[in-house]
Image: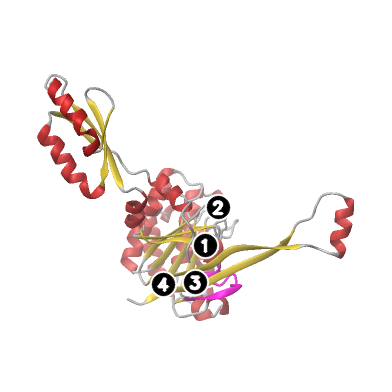
């Protein structure tokens, strides 16, 4: 499978100056300024195969949006290189722009005082989309997103969820091969988020489109994306399968085991107490224990408990994905 995106030693540095308060520093800044460099993206490398759905994670200021802007040609790298579908994005060739889409949750492509259909028509003309193809694609997208009833309503009268669905339609009308999504569900209610994620998962699988998604909703990333790239302070700290990340940072599975009171004898309690250390058990009370075992030993440990003692309840705890990501943010940066 060919790579849709290739990034090598990508850097983006912004220059800014800090002016102290007061009259004298203000006058001084007119004649001489002390500039500082801020490395928004610092020596990042990765590849994304065609047809992949990849999550792009990192805390605020990690460099996610800056990276997407360089991949889409909005920004030019300070150094390093990136290729998208064989094109250098900063060249901004028309053939390249016809093959990508970009949705930013905090910026709109829609014309505020006009209905979405007018923006769709403008998009059709700008991208030179054949009318029959445009009609078929628009019909498919509006049905999948269930927005047929709002196409003639001015954008300013639409809800945030409805506007975001129309933003997606605008970016997909020309059938891009690569789609960049920067916080597309920011500010949306839970139901609207679910609808958008369901649509994206279905549409991406059907069209074999390459999608690079940034989001603060970790569970959505986990459900949609097999692979994730994590940035922190402009540097890459992880690139691989989400499951691999979880296994690395949460190598144990935890659960609660509760025993039948009337069937648990004193000698059995003594035996449990004796086996606590070896079986990774922590006693909560006379009937309840917390088990924490390596993932590869989970099956054997639970079978041993079920064979050895009268079990009333066995409940394994879900992995806290938010905690996993927070641990990932603190990982040592690596190129």
Between the residue at mark 4 and the residue at mark 3, the CA separation in whole angstroms equals 17 Å
Quadrant in the rendering for residue 4: bottom left
Residue located beneath label 1 in the image:
235
Q: Is residue 228 above or below residue 318?
A: below
Residues rendered magenta in the picture: 69-83
Q: Nearer the viewer, residue 53 or 48?
A: 48
Q: Nearer the viewer, mark 2 or mark 4?
A: 2
Q: Nearer the viewer, mark 3 or mark 1?
A: 1
Between the residue at mark 3 and the residue at mark 2, the CA separation in whole angstroms equals 35 Å
Its colouring scheme is: secondary structure
Q: Nearer the viewer, residue 297 or 21?
A: 297
Upstream in sequence: badge 1 or badge 4 = 4
Residue located beneath label 3 in the image:
124
Q: Nearer the viewer, mark 1 or mark 4?
A: 1
Residue appearing at x 58%, y 72% in the figure: 77
Between the residue at mark 2 and the residue at mark 4, the CA separation in whole angstroms equals 28 Å
Residue appearing at x 34%, y 48% in the figure: 250
- Asked whether 70 falls inside the magenta stretch, the response is yes
Residue located beneath label 2 in the image:
60
Quadrant in the rendering for residue 313: top left
Upstream in sequence: badge 2 or badge 4 = 2
């Amino acid at each position: 499978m060919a790579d849709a995106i290739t990034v090598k030693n990508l850097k983006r540095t912004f220059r800014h100056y800090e002016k102290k308060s007061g009259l004298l520093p203000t006058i001084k800044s007119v004649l001489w300024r002390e500039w500082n460099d801020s490395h928004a993206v610092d020596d990042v490398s990765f590849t994304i195969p065609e047809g992949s759905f990849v999550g792009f994670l990192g805390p605020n200021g990690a460099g996610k949006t800056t990276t997407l802007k360089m991949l889409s040609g909005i920004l030019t790298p300070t150094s390093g290189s990136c290729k998208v579908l064989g094109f250098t994005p900063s060249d901004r060739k028309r053939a390249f722009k016809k093959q990508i889409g970009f949705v930013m949750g905090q910026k709109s492509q829609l014309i505020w005082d006009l209905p979405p259909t007018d923006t769709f028509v403008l998009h059709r003309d700008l991208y030179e989309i054949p009318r029959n193809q445009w009609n078929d694609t628009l019909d498919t997208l509006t049905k999948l997103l269930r927005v047929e009833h709002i196409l003639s309503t001015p954008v300013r009268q639409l809800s945030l969820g409805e506007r975001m669905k129309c933003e997606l339609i605008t970016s997909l009308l020309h059938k891009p091969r690569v789609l960049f999504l920067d916080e597309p569900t920011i500010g949306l209610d839970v139901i609207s988020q679910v609808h958008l994620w369901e649509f994206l998962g279905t549409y991406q699988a059907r069209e074999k489109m390459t999608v690079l998604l940034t989001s603060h909703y970790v569970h959505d990333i986990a459900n949609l994306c097999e692979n994730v790239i994590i940035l922190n302070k402009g540097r890459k700290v992880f690139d691989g399968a989400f499951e691999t990340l979880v296994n690395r940072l949460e190598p144990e599975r935890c659960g609660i085991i509760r025993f039948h009171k009337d069937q648990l004898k004193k000698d059995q309690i003594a035996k449990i107490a004796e086996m606590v250390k070896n079986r990774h058990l922590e006693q909560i009370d006379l009937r309840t224990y917390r088990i924490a075992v390596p993932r590869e030993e989970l099956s054997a440990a639970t079978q041993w408990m079920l064979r050895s003692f009268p079990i009333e309840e066995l409940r394994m705890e879900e992995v806290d994905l938010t905690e996993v990501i927070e641990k990932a943010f603190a990982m040592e940066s690596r190129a």
